[in-house]
Amino acid sequence: MFVGRFDGQSKLLVRSLLCGTSGALRAVDVFHRQQRVNPDMSLCPFMETLCQDEVTCPQTEDQPLTVEPLVCLFPALFKHNLLSFVYLVHSVLPRPAVLRLLKCLTQDPHPSPWVIALVRQLERTTGTHDDPPLYTLLCSQRLKELSQRLVGFGETGGWAACRSGPTVESDSQHAGGSSELRTQRKRKGSFVTLDSDCEETGQRSKRMKMDVSGGECRDVDEWSTKEATSESAAPAETLGEELQPAPDGPCDTLPEHIKVSVLQIKELLESQTEWDQISMEVFKVLNDCDPGQVEVFCSMLSFPDLPEQTLPNLCSSILAPALDFSYSTAATLIRSLLLQKVLSLSEPASRCLVTAVTALCSRYPRPACHALIGPVLEEKNIGNSQAELLNRLIEGCLDSHYRLLVLQMTFKVSWGEAVLSVIHSVLDSKPDFSEELFTQFSEQLLSQGPQFTKSVKFAKMVLTVLTKYNSHVTAAHKHSLQSCLMVNETFLKKSLQAALKRIAHA
């Protein structure tokens, strides 16, 4: 796409305009939020970039290069949303900029009928189109005739009367009206589902007013509720109730601009397109969240259930240079995104998961230790898959200080073969042991060693201690280590005792 041609603020607008049929309203929300942050913000750079000439390559070698305005190279849906957006905010736009944009859109070699109609409408709004208005006296008369034809002469007009259908005069008409109203009620129930993800309360209240406008409409709804069977009405109503957010649900704790960002991120996660810098801008909203709001944010986006193939793009956006999260925010994101996926591993981690884990751990090592590595070590049934992934983090992402932090975490859990593998990885990385920490580690060897009398992995770990850390071994350590080696039953017992003796003669 051509999003890279725009500056940071304009990229947010472009991304919003690319977000489906609701792109125009999303762009208006983004524009208003940008104005609140920067009252002097102008849309002129955005409009000028859209009008810049762009050289396009021909589809075949026989055709020459062509020069078109950048706006003509965007898909038709973007143009629809753009013109709707301009119509909604044209009062704050310089008239020459709007006219230039409309002129550029007329140069589109393959215009959409909707684009042509929207351009004409904007030209009328700005006073540059000489065609007669769309709503003329003749149009008004025809609309009245159509309305009378639908509801009958002398009856109450309006769309509420149209919904109510003809007056019940016979059993057959009664049955037909009942069927029609049940169909409408199903449509109403299915319509509610479109607004299930924390849409703005203004739109919900507007629909509620439309649904109950007029006593006649309310009477019809009550009558249709009584007459409709459970097979037709109940499923639609149940679906609407399930998807409608609770009045005091977690979504209500988020400010409106965060809710809008959640919807934008959800669309990004569901799309198959490649993310760009505009995606990173959306995540800046996390800097405005307190720890509780970050929890709600992650829950609304179902971070623990995201497919692993979405993790690289998501982590690239989270790790953008412009974002610098606090400890609590980073810990919450890491816990929500990765912990459940790592704990559920039954085979080696996928490349996508490894990429995400290593990237987040490298950028936020302390939150990763406390939100991911520590909880994994505390899990009783971790296996080789988890241990292998933690070893990769220890070797490639953590410096000496954080490796020792991981070692201290192992002191609080019961050791198993997987934990031994992690400890061995820490020891192989040669962290800078303090005397106090080495004493604590030797005490752990003595207390947890009896359950590993036949474990070759434990014997190798002790051999690493005796060969690589012999300078840390004091007389008290030697005594405890000798007691530990006495009960060892592996083929490495003699090698261990020989290594301990060499320390004794040093």
Image (cartoon, helix red, strand yellow):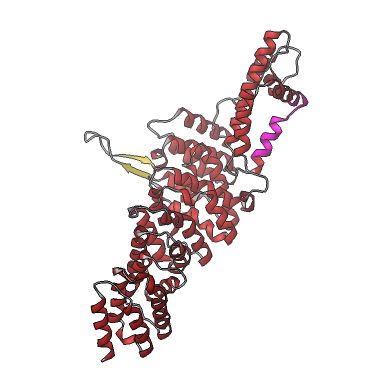
The reply to whether the magenta stretch includes residue 16 is no
- Quadrant holding the N terminus: top left
Q: Residue furthest bottom?
A: 505
Q: Residue furthest left?
A: 61
Q: Nearer the viewer, residue 95 or 33?
A: 33
Residue at left offset 36%, top offset 62%: 387
Residue 69, given in percent of the width and then of the height, sits at 39, 41
Residue 215, given in percent of the width and then of the height, sits at 77, 26
Q: Is residue 238 left or right of residue 284?
A: right
Residue at left offset 65%, top offset 38%: 204
Whether 392 is drawn above or below 127: the answer is below
Residue 49, given in percent of the width and then of the height, sits at 43, 48
Kindly indicate the quadrant of the structure image that contains residue 71.
top left
User: Would residue 57 be seen by someone viewing this image from the given angle?
Assistant: yes
Q: Main secondary structure of the magenta part?
A: helix
Q: Nearer the viewer, residue 342 or 37?
A: 342
Kindly indicate the quadrant of the structure image that contains residue 140.
top right
Could you tell me how many numbered marks the image carries? Answer: 0
Q: Is residue 24 left or right of residue 445?
A: right
Q: Residue furthest right?
A: 215
User: Would residue 136 be seen by someone viewing this image from the given angle?
Assistant: no
The reply to whether the magenta stretch includes residue 208 is yes
Q: Which residues are magenta?
A: 203-218
Whether 388 is drawn above or below 438: the answer is above
Whether 139 is drawn above or below 119: the answer is above
Residue at left offset 27%, top offset 37%: 58
Q: Nearer the viewer, residue 36 or 263?
A: 263
- Quadrant holding the C terminus: bottom left
Q: Is residue 374 left or right of residue 85?
A: left
Residue 159, given in percent of the width and then of the height, sits at 68, 23
